[in-house]
């Protein structure tokens, strides 16, 4: 009896561990094509077509933002068949000297594949180590960013760099560190930020007046 109780407790704890490490929920059916895209309602399976699972135009991105990047994303918001599958996919172009500021994806890991060019990418571990793992990726290289860790990306090629990025979440949230701190509304106390960043308060107030993230471009 004692061994059975221990086995039951062990299995229960293992189940909780599996749940805690899970990302998006597992679907209960083959697919749930959203209708319309981004809606939680599933389309009648008899009305689903192959077009619900594909997207054209990832090779035709929009304008570059202030950081010199532009992205097109395939997700549940743009491809109905992505709904409930816990995935997003993006194609990102970096102009010459383009970069992404330090940022995190709180709910997902990220796999980066270099299509052309060269990309310096790195991530920083948590307190107290703050170890920075960085690498220059060339065409054909793959790199993974562990879930939630602060990371950096910049084009180090002499021309544009193109990558694809896949994440294991349906809602690929992103927090750009400089933007979130200096563009917060209402503004964070400038005296506090001056102390936190070891800057003078005038510099902080100036940073708080800057135009930060360009919301017309898909975040990556």
Image: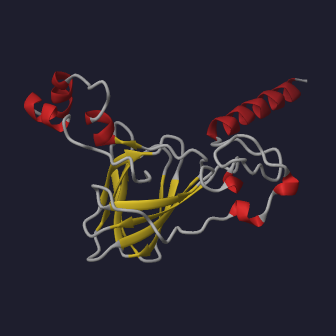
Question: What coloring was used for the rendering?
Answer: secondary structure
For residue 194, what is the image quadrant?
top left
Q: Position of residue 63 (x, y in %)?
A: 36, 62
Q: Is residue 198 visible?
A: no
30 up-or-down from 196: above or below = below
- Is 76 placed left or right of 199 in the picture? right
For residue 162, what is the image quadrant?
bottom left
* Numbered label tally: 0
Q: Position of residue 90 (x, y in %)?
A: 51, 60
Give the residue at x 30% y 59%.
99
190 up-or-down from 215: above or below = above
Residue found farthest to the right: 1
- Is 109 placed left or right of 178 in the picture? right
Q: Position of residue 130 (x, y in %)?
A: 33, 43
Give the residue at x 33% y 48%.
214
Give the residue at x 26% y 25%.
188
Q: Position of residue 109 (x, y in %)?
A: 52, 50
Image quarter in which the N terminus is found: top right
Q: Nearer the viewer, residue 131 or 5?
A: 131
Q: Nearer the viewer, residue 161 or 144?
A: 161
Q: Is residue 195 visible?
A: yes
92 up-or-down from 13: above or below = below
For residue 135, what is the image quadrant?
bottom left
Q: Nearer the viewer, residue 129 or 62?
A: 62
């Amino acid at each position: 009896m004692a061994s059975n109780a221990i086995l039951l407790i062990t299995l229960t704890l293992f189940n909780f561990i599996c749940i805690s490490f899970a990302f998006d929920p597992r679907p209960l059916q083959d697919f749930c094509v959203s209708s319309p895209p981004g809606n939680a309602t599933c389309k009648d399976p008899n009305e689903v077509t192959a077009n619900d699972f594909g997207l054209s135009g990832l090779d035709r991105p929009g304008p570059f933002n202030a950081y010199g990047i532009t992205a097109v994303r395939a997700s549940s918001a743009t491809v109905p068949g992505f709904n409930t599958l816990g995935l997003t996919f993006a194609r990102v172009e970096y102009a010459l000297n383009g970069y992404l500021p330090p940022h995190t994806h709180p709910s997902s890991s990220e796999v980066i594949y270099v299509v052309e060019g060269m990309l310096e990418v790195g991530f920083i571990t948590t307190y107290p180590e703050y170890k920075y793992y960085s690498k220059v990726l060339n065409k054909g290289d793959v790199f993974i960013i562990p879930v939630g860790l602060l990371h950096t990306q910049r084009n180090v090629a002499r021309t544009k760099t193109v990558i694809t990025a896949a994440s294991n979440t349906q809602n690929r949230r992103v927090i750009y560190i400089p933007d979130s701190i200096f563009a917060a509304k209402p503004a964070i106390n400038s005296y506090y930020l001056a102390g936190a960043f070891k800057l003078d308060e005038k510099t902080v107030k100036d940073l708080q007046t800057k135009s930060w993230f360009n919301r017309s471009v898909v975040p990556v």
